[in-house]
Image: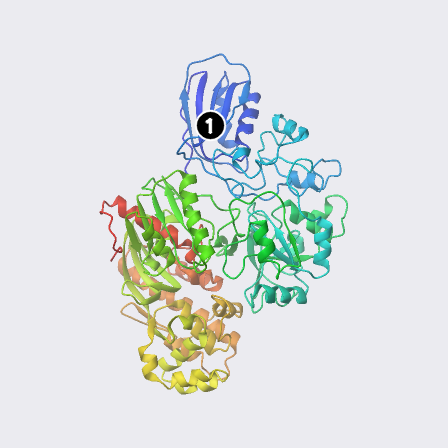
Amino acid sequence: MHTPAISAINVSRVRIRVSGAVQGVGFRPFMHHLAARYSLAGFVLNDGESVVAEIEGVQLDKFIGELDMQKPTLARIDRIVVTSLPFEGQKGFTIRESVGTERGSARIVPDAATCPSCLGELFDVDSRFHLYAFVTCTQCGPRSTIVHRLPYDRLNTSMAGFAPCGACARDYRDPANRRFHAETIACAVCGPRMSHSIGEIAAALRRGMIVALKGVGAYQLMCDATNEAAVTQLRRRKQRPGKPLAVMAANVASVEYFAAPTVEERKLLGHICRPIVLVRSRMELAPSVAPGMNRVGVMLPSAPVHHLLFHALAGYPAGLVWLDAPHLTSLVATSANIGGQPPIIDELEAKEALVDIADLVVTHDRPILVRMDDSVMAVVDDAPVMIRRSRGLVPEPIDLGEDGPTVLATGAHLKATLCVTRGREAFVSQHLGDLRAADTIRFYQDTARQMMATLGVAPEIVACDLHPDYRSTLFAQSTGLPLLQVQHHAAHIAAVAAEHQMRGRVLGVALDGYGYGDDGAAWGGELILLSGATWKRLGHLAPLAMPGGDRAALEPWRMGVAALTALGRGAEAARRFPGIALASRLASAPDVIGAAVMTTSMGRLFDAAAALLGVNTRQNYEGQAAMELEALVRSAKCLPSGYRIANHVLDFRPLLAGLLEPGLQADEGADVFHGTLIEGLAEWISRTANELGGIEIVLGGGCLTNRVLAEGLAFRLRGLGLNPRLPRAVPANDGGLSLGQAAMARAYLVAGTAASSHAIRR
């Protein structure tokens, strides 16, 4: 965020307006303490835009000087504006009742993991918060998931139904107390309660049972991560046969029993948002937790109830030492949504929908108002990247670096998100899921309305994908706003450029599974020149047939047959895919292959390689073949003459031929495949960059979630004198697409082009 602007003052009374993430973070109590320190009088309150204070006294300069330097942990200050006022001679300093405005610029802060002070009280036998599963203060606990409107006051949250007891009311009014004006304050006497005791939940987990636990942003399904029978049962009941499951551990020391986090990954695990972090795994978990993977998604407790569970599973040890000590217990902690449905937050729905999945459904009586999955992150190229941006991170905005028009962007069909811009900020929604099920579509539509209402904006234009049948496109059309369609891969590049505040021309490579091209073809390996709202496709991967159309993304053997046919070796299909009778029939039907949809997709190239190497021929979830291929890599190495470049077309057919060498093992093939991709892409990009001269480079698209590819390509490009930018603030996959659409729509309006209902073209 930009540096706050503080006006110089030489008066004894001022009005101070602090804008940014300053509601729900203890900012009013902070100002109260600061005023007391410097013997200042006046008041402070929340309104629909910011925190506003009127203060008078002789040490105002010191007060203002410390506002940004000493601000609360969760606060994010964008701007401080100071206005001179006539001196009134007030006595004392008060926190006044909040006032609302019809449209404001205030923002809600993300949920925050339990702070060390609350954690200490949770296990302090002398504290009235001892073992209370909803302990919180001004510096931690739920925020965005329990707020339905601003200003941030208890009455505007799901805590409205819990009247504070005498002790909590005293803490709330006591300036010396950490919970002074903590809107979520509650204790066992007056606050939310759980339907089952911690002891009952722990006993069920010990017996190998599956527990559905109502968390902060949604229900989670939990079981013993070392119990293969329990994990297998969970997969069978949830109908999730292969997709990796996340694992929760008590602390970083416990993670090391089953994973090997790096220094940067340790830091990320301890981040206040408590994301799931992809970490290299060991062999201590049940095999079914992450089959075929060499990394496992790991998370630490994000709420008091999680800490209490591990405390009970560890045998109720006394004192606080156990919080840092290693424990063998680890729990699968995965979303309780069913088959593409949105996360479950309602108690009645949970009891009905989860009756055949969970042996025990644990609820509590604090409503979840905004449903959010756990965020997923990884460390790539020595810095964090997003894989799924949700709880703990949303609704923190992305700074675009300059003011611009207000737009709504509707994202993609899979991994859908929405983006609304306001001023210089872009608000990207939580992960909303795949727009296939009716309930997910309703969740998506409700989120769009809620975002615009909370932000108090009226978009000038709506941006969406080029694909005419995406639900996100149809929703954009239904808004009645001027419509702007943005090509899928141009949006991927624009998203990276937007988060890095890049101006002018950029050269981007979009490596993806599928995107609707402006010629109607299936794109996915594109070299794009982007400048504001205009783009040009400079090059692409050599096309491969995609027999069966969309089925090829589910059945990699089809791409394997296409590769064999392209190499003139279709006769080998029967031997390479012996269990698939259709493979040989398809390979012997050149007319069928010739009539198939052609694709330039990097994702389908991964599928072809995985099939030829015998790694995966049928996928249970999106990206499985590519992920399993990546997991086999030991040391990437380039196959000499494994690619060709002509007229900006990058052809990896020589590499595919190399994967057919007799005796080549799958792990050797994975090494060669990744190493050759990296070298070929680097040469392709650098050649074009040299032709253009003085161009900045961005890398985008879902294939950049492949750590080997992303790190290797970035390293190789730097060796060629280029400085590539990777996606960081939003996912490289389609979860970041809405940001790119929004950035291009803003540029389109700023350029003064009349809004129309046709696509942005080259």
Q: Residue at x 44, y 27 (%)?
A: 17
- Residue 456 relative to residue 460: left or right: right
Q: Is residue 164 visible?
A: yes
- Residue in view at x 70 percent, y 62 percent: 208
Image quadrant containing the N terminus = top left
Q: How is the image coloured?
A: rainbow
Task: Please state which of residues 670 and 213 is positioned toward the viewer in this rendering.
Answer: 213
Name the residue nearer the viewer: 619 or 458: 458
Q: How many marks?
A: 1
Type of the residue with mark 1: Val
Task: Give the x, y percent position of residue 668.
Answer: 51, 75
Give the structural element (helix, strand or loop) at label 1: loop
Nearer to the camera, 659 or 424: 424
Give the percent coordinates (x, y) of residue 12.
46, 16
Q: In this rendering, is residue 113 above or below 234?
A: above
Give the residue drawn at x 55%, y 25%.
Answer: 32
For the C terminus, the quadrant is bottom left
* Residue 202 picture location, percent across and down: 71, 54
Residue visible at 58% across and 65% down in the picture: 290
Q: Identify residue for label 1.
A: 99
Give 458 or 117, whichever is nearer the viewer: 458
Mark 1: few, some, or many residues within 10 Å (few <14, many ≥20)?
few
The image quarter containing residue 565 is bottom left
156 sits left or right of 126 in the view:
left
Instruction: Return the x and y of residue 430 as percentages of the image width and height.
Output: 47, 50
Residue 638 shows in the view: no
Q: Residue furthest top?
A: 89
Q: In this rendering, is residue 244 above or below 220?
A: below
User: Hey, which quadrant is residue 338 in on the image?
Assistant: bottom right
Name which quarter of the figure residue 566 lies in.
Answer: bottom left
